[in-house]
Image: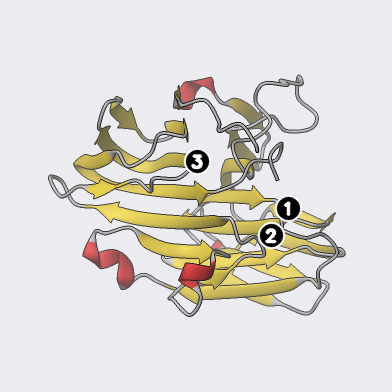
Amino acid sequence: MRTPPTPLIDVRRSGGRSQTELPWLRGRHSFWVPGQLHDPGNTHHGLLLVNNEDVIQPGTGFDTHPHRDMEIVTWVLEGALVHQDSAGNSGVIHPGLAQRMSAGTGILHSEKNDSWRLGGGQPHTNPVHLIQMWVVPGETGATPGYEQLEIDNDLLTGDLVTVASGMPQHKGATAIHIGNPHAALYAARLLPGRPVHLPDAPYVHLFVTCGTVHAEGIGALLAGDAVRLTATGGQRITATAPAEILVWEMHADLARR
């Protein structure tokens, strides 16, 4: 029998993230990324390996590059991002639209700031601001796939809304599918004074995309702050100003699969 994980609440402040500063990209990384000083204690939480906050300048972006055996979920906060891949999928991702790419056996894709299209073909200066998250798949070698879904109206409730999931209980629910039965992503646009509760799961990752919230037993959290919860979930989260949060519920860990 596996030993249950030790209960832990690990608060990670926005300013403590590693950074990428390029003329076209401002990146903030919750976990270690290749090319930066290796941090063996900060490689993942549960099944989540990447939680990047990127701001991409107009007319720029990530040129075509490969991925393999990864479930990649993109959530846009401002602006629009255009996706194209070698499987023939394409789409424009904007706030309130969830997108997932399953890399599987291997796929090439590009992600570019689509602001020029939004301006009627006239260049302008709107950046695109996004969160991109990677979780490992339940099985390697799957067929690559792509899915996007508009959930903007669901977010008007102020409740946690299922964004992406591979968990059996979410089958058929309004969510995009990811290829891991032990993980689900939720989003909430919180109204001040109206709380939501985090899932009670072995591994939970809370990220504040904007605004300010108060987390029960933790305290104030600002935009860019994150909390990694191990074997201790269910906390009440209350916005102290209009806010948005992203929450991963995970029932496995890379070392415990």
Of 87 and 42, nearer the camera is 42
Residue in view at x 54 percent, y 64 percent: 167
Residue contact between numbered discs 2 and 1, judged by CB atoms under 8 Å? yes
Q: Position of residue 180 (x, y in %)?
A: 65, 60
Q: Secondary structure at mark 3?
A: loop
Residue contact between numbered discs 1 and 3, judged by CB atoms under 8 Å? no
Give how far apart the Cα atoms at labels 1 and 3 are: 34 Å
Precedes in sequence: disc 3 or disc 2: 2
Picture layout, residue 118 above or below residue 35: below
In the image, is 136 to the left or to the right of 181?
right
Give the quadrant of residue 54.
Answer: top right
Q: Residue at label 2?
A: 111
Q: Residue at label 1?
A: 62
Residue in view at x 72 percent, y 77 percent: 89
Of 156 and 166, nearer the camera is 166
Q: Is residue 120 visible?
A: no
At label 3, which amino acid type do we have? Answer: Pro
Q: Secondary structure at mark 1?
A: strand
Q: Residue at label 3?
A: 202
Give how far apart the Cα atoms at labels 2 and 1 are: 5 Å
At label 1, which amino acid type do we have? Answer: Phe
Q: Secondary structure at mark 2?
A: strand
Q: Position of residue 69 (x, y in %)?
A: 80, 57
Residue contact between numbered discs 3 and 2, judged by CB atoms under 8 Å? no
